[in-house]
Amino acid sequence: MPGRGTGLLLNPNLAGTSLVCMLGIILLICKKETFLVCLGFSALAIFLTFSRSSWIFFLFFLFIFRDIFKFKNIIIFSVFGLLAIPLIIFLFIQVQGDNVLLIERYIETMAARLDVFSLTQESTLSETDQDRYNLINKSLREFENNILFGNGYGYTSTSLWAQGTHNMHLRFLVEMGLFGYFFYFLIYSFFFLKFLTEKDQNLSKLYLLYFALLFFCAFFSHNFFENYTIVFMVAVVSCLDVIKQK
Amino acid sequence: MQLVRNLTYLFLIFIFSSGLATYLATIGLSFSAYSLVFILFIFALEKLYEGKIYIDGKLIFITLLVLLNCFYFVFFSAPIDTMPIFFNFIGSIIMFLIVYLSLNQNIILLFKKAFPILSIITSIIIIFSYINPELLVSIESDDYCLEEVQACCSIQILQVHL
């Protein structure tokens, strides 16, 4: 995908989100120094995905684990700041096969993704945002067709839906109705209940992070359960309590 | 058995969880989800042999979720081929069951080494895929998205209005 880093997942949203999920587990099980090294690499990668939901998710992650960023860690971040200099220089290299510099593409993508001008001038709303707005309206209309049991398994993968719903909640509601959505509700409620009841603070925060993934990030992506990376992380975190019981 | 478990997890982490399986599928090399069935079968056999299967609400919930999907798949499918979607879901459930049956403290020790390495490798690949968009998929591929075209359109609309 040009203009956005995708990695092997070939999807910027999933790439960014799964990196944040991975950072949560690393923070819980590894030493702080190891975590900070991973954070240094991941922060830049998440930024380059230009996925707004991943950015918000990453900021949420930094907020809930803010107590680990003490003064001595700032020194480590400074070292990573120095490492950013060659990367900044690299941005002035001409893109392979195109007649633009990397920095030009970066500014274009950034302006399109943030889309700040549409706040004052609706006519400048980017196609992506307009599509999402239309998708929400369309999903709600389709949901009303059969509120209890939905429109059928795989309905949002038909040719009527070129981009899916871009929303896990709406996907369940449109395909399986309130009956199917109840099961999705149980999945994210599990993490929220664990967050409220877990005594270990770090583990409790990790549950909160995964609740945020399945509740808030789910408003921006519809394919969490089709992706083994996210499924694996969710499975590991949800089974952490099983280890204690075994 | 612990060695088998560790090797299995390394396979799961670096093939399925890293996205390598997704990428290889785009170039015609697919890792079949049947390998997951085989892994689950081994772990289930081990648990049956030990006679120590831990059952909690999660296992009951997953069973209900499978039944729900089977019900919708059989009786309430959209008018398209929903078989790939269903198999994808079953693959995810098998992945969960593997973790549920086999996760232990030794695996967490393995994660301590594997996850930092995976996150750094993933980050580097993301950075390089940004620098060179054709690094992983060619421009002719269906996986090469038109996001940049959308971005350029947005900029042009912006310039017109300014």
Image (tube, rainbow, N blue to C red):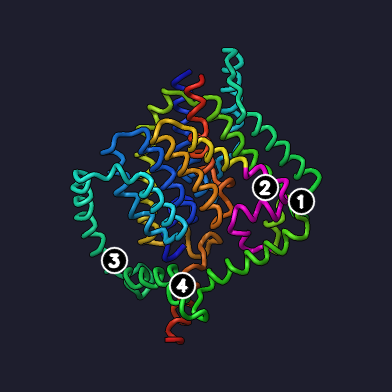
Asked if residue B54 lies in the magenta stretch, the reply is no
Q: What residue type is labelled 3?
A: Leu
Residue at horizontal 43 percent and vertical 68 percent from the top: A114
Which residue lies at the image location 51% right of the left edge and 38% below the top edge? A232
Cα separation between marks 2 and 3? 45 Å
Q: Do the residues labelled 2 and 3 touch (CB within 8 Å)?
A: no
Outermost residue, right side = B75
Question: Counting residues from the N terminus, which is met first, the one under dot 2 or under dot 3?
Answer: 3
What residue did someone put label 3 on?
A: A91
Chain of the residue displaying label 4: B
Instruction: State which quadrant residue B44 falls in.
Output: top right
Choose mark 4 or mark 3, whichever is in front.
Answer: 4
Do dots 4 and 1 share one subunit? no
Secondary structure under badge 3? loop
**What label does residue A181 carry, if any?**
2
Q: What residue type is labelled 1?
A: Leu
Give the SS element for disc 4: helix
Give the residue type at disc 4: Ala
> Alpha carbon of mark 1 to alpha carbon of mark 2: how far?
9 Å
Callouts 1 and 2 on one subunit: yes
User: Which type of secondary structure does the marked residue at label 2 adopt?
Assistant: helix
Instruction: Give the image location of residue A4, x and y in percent.
Output: 42, 62
Give me the chain letter of mark 2: A
Give above or below for A67 relative to A140: above
> Which residue corresponds to mark 4?
B151
Which is closer to the viewer, label 2 or label 3? 2
First to last magenta residue range: A161-185
User: Furthest-top residue in view?
Assistant: B50
Q: Residues within 10 Å of mark 2 (few under 14, many from 20)?
A: many
